[in-house]
Image (cartoon, helix red, strand yellow):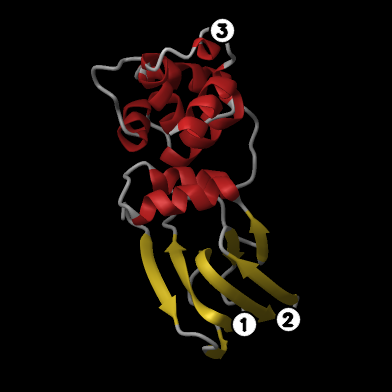
Amino acid sequence: MSGSTVTVVRYAPFQQIRPHTHNEEGLTIVLSGTFLEEAVKGTMLANAGWVATRPYGLRHTNRFGAQGAVILAVIPDREHFDERIRDWNWAEAPVAFRAALRLVARDVDALPELLSALGPRKRPDRVLAVRARRLLDDVETRPSISSLAQAMDVHPVHLARQFRQEYGVSPRDYRTVQNGEARHHGDRRYDDAPLANCARLWLRRS
């Protein structure tokens, strides 16, 4: 998908994988079940909603719980993930998990949003975010993140990250609100609410 390798992998109950390494850096998102990973730096136990970053060459073992596990494995290409993965880390990441679920459903905007949620925060580029917001305001075109980034000559991941840092929501969530879906329901709470609050109110209803 867009140069990245994205795979849904299912593991059997109590399955074990012997010590091994990978020839590329990658991301692991636990979609369901229990996933245990052991490396020299320690042991991580993760449930659904947890996300791992794995640097190149990390030697590790894996074990799975009584229900097995389903994970989303992502090997990002350099075009869409311009920061190298240097640390082995597990963390609960609701934004990334939600994007992963959409990615499984083949949402074209989900991959850049997933990667932007995991990368390090950079100095905000307000001009870029404002310009993107103006383009998203055009409800006739409804551009995807990828096409929007291409038009602005930036990485989709960089665009998604800058937009979220400036406005507190993803470009997709903003577009959902801007399309008029929320106001169509006649909820006056949206009229004067800040952008981030407006999106969150609507998303809780959808």
Residue lying at 67% horizontally and 72% vertically, measured from the top left: 45
Q: Secondary structure at mark 3?
A: loop
* Tags 2 and 1 touching, CB below 8 Å: yes
**Left or right for 178, reference 21:** left
User: What kind of element bears circle 1?
Assistant: loop
Residue plotted at (30% across, 28% down): 143
Between circles 3 and 1, the one closer to the viewer is 3
Question: Can you tell which mark lies on residue 192?
Answer: 3
Circle 1 residues within 10 Å: few <14, some 14–19, many ≥20: some
What residue is pinned by disc 2?
40
In the image, is residue 142 above or below residue 65? Answer: above
Which residue does the numbered mark 1 point to in the structure image?
Answer: 59
Label 2: how many Cα within 10 Å (few below 14, some 14–19, many 20+): few
Between disc 2 and disc 3, the foreground one is 3
Residue contact at pointers 2 and 3, CB within 8 angstroms: no
Which kind of residue does numbered mark 2 sit on?
A: Val
